[in-house]
Amino acid sequence: MATKRKSDAGAKPQKRGRKKKDDYDSDLSDGADYVEDKSGKVEVLISGSDDLEPVAKLPEELLATYDKTPGKMLVAGLVTWDLTGRRDPKGKVTKIRPNLYTFHKFTDQMYRFAVSGPPSAHSILINMDRKAMTFGRNQFGQLGQPELRVYEKPTLVPALENMNIIQAACGRNHSLFLTDTGTVYACGDNKSGQCGIGNVCPTVTTATKIHYRGPPIIRIGCGADFSVILDIKGNLYTFGLPEYGQLGHNTDGKYFVNANKLTFHFETSPKKVVLYIEKSKEGHVTPVDGVQIVDFACGNNHTVAIDSKKRAYSWGFGGFGRLGHAEQKDELVPRLIKSFDSQGRGVRSIYCGATYSLAITDIGQLFLFGQNKKTGEANMYPKPVQDLAGWNITCIGCSNTSIVISADDTLIVWGASPTYGELGLGDMQKSSTVPKEVTRLEGMKIPHVTMGYSHTILLVNTDHELTKEKYDKLPEFDIED
């Protein structure tokens, strides 16, 4: 014990004292030797990569798949963005807006796409001109706007005004944008390298091109503090925080800087996921060859992906069975989900909430695994959601604990308490542990739904007569006052 103290009392404290001045998370400064050495190498590459802007657009038939029916925006839930996911904002919030317990009209523009994420207090919209607009919390520059303050109205992202944005993704405090040339831009919190720009500069306030050279990117996604991108050839790349193996590189990236300081080898540039495995009951591991990923979804600390043969793989944090392997172990590389590897159970699409995953099979059946409530039992392996058998599902939004599903011209929602109005059921019934229809929106065409931590955004197709009629009667969320 004494010797330990002596060694601590050596030359180190001066070094530590210097680090303490740093305003940012000490994880950064403590990994200094490692980070400097790495980012030094990387930055040389960055300077050269700017002139390599791929000018060619993605193939037209591929771009056409991003064009879903556009619609007008409805919003519900907690709209005081500084309060989202926080118990005590310590007087920082100047203007508290009442929660919206029913869906409200918000701006009268049409949008092609809207996105937020299970840990997010901000949202991204793509307007009809394919320009990115952002609103919500902007503490770390995740909106790509010039000022670090809450933006209550959708505002164009200045750095991306000359680009056509076809997709976007929101993490806890960072954002990714995908252009029609297959290039990815990122902004926001970068303490774990989740912006992928080759360093761990703590905040990236302007949308910056990620440090990636390779085939064009066709899909992007964000977990809480990590990011995943998919190229046109079916390869996945991940970057950011490796804590639970959510990057799929067969490591959790942990190392000790000194006797009592643990930190991570952050992945600051996109790194390819090279191994996909299958595990037998006895624990024998066999690699799965020729995997071509076509789609994926990220939860806070896990990822689920589908390949061209409709098999599903999951990796990252295993708690509550959210990986669907009937055990709670973290998986450090993508592992085949056995339940979906049988005839007639191929996966068509996948969605992830904070601690759960949802899969729709070929025959349109919805499966849930993990836990979408704070207490009670979890689904340790994919179980069908019987209440939704026979419904034709269009789109799903997942939040921290709530789920919103657009199916057969209506909206089906559920989420255990506490909820903040994101279910849009009205202020008499705020939460529901079983799937419930939002009667106010019955008969409406809802091509797109997305959820943040405690808010929901819907895009409704007002070209449809009944939808337009109902839309016009809905209250407006006015932020002028």
Image (cartoon, grey):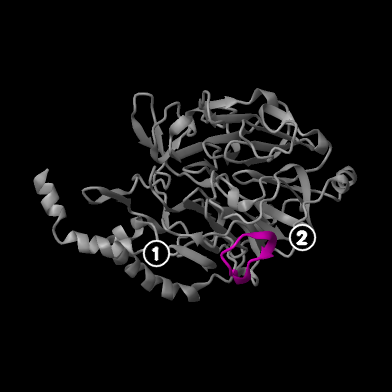
Residue denoted by label 2: 480
Quarter where residue 138 is shown: bottom right
Horizontal side of residue 439 vs 381, given as left or right = right
Q: Quadrant of the N terminus?
A: top left
Residue denoted by label 1: 199
Badge 2, how many Cα within 10 Å: few under 14, some, many 20+? few
Horizontal side of residue 366 vs 446, given as left or right = left
Tag nearer the camera, 1 or 2: 2
Query: Which type of secondary structure does the marked residue at label 2 adopt?
Result: loop
Q: Earlier in the sequence, mark 1 or mark 2?
A: 1
Query: Which type of secondary structure does the marked residue at label 1 adopt?
Result: loop
Horizontal side of residue 391 vs 372, given as left or right = right
Q: Position of residue 223 (x, y in %)?
A: 50, 48
Residue at 47% in and 38% down: 314
Q: Position of residue 216 (x, y in %)?
A: 54, 61
- For this rendering, which residue is in front, 55 or 39? 39
Please state which amino acid type lies under the numbered disc 2: Glu
- Vertical order, 125 against 158 (above or below): above
Whether residue 210 appears in this view of the structure is no
- Vertical order, 44 against 134 (above or below): below
Q: Quadrant of the C terminus?
A: bottom right
- For this rendering, which residue is in front, 30 or 346? 30
Please state which amino acid type lies under the numbered disc 1: Asn
Read off the magenta span.
146-159
Q: Position of residue 279 (x, y in %)?
A: 39, 31
- For this rendering, which residue is in front, 391 or 222? 222
Q: Residue furthest left?
A: 3
- Vertical order, 292 against 141 (above or below): above
Residue at 56% in and 65% down: 148
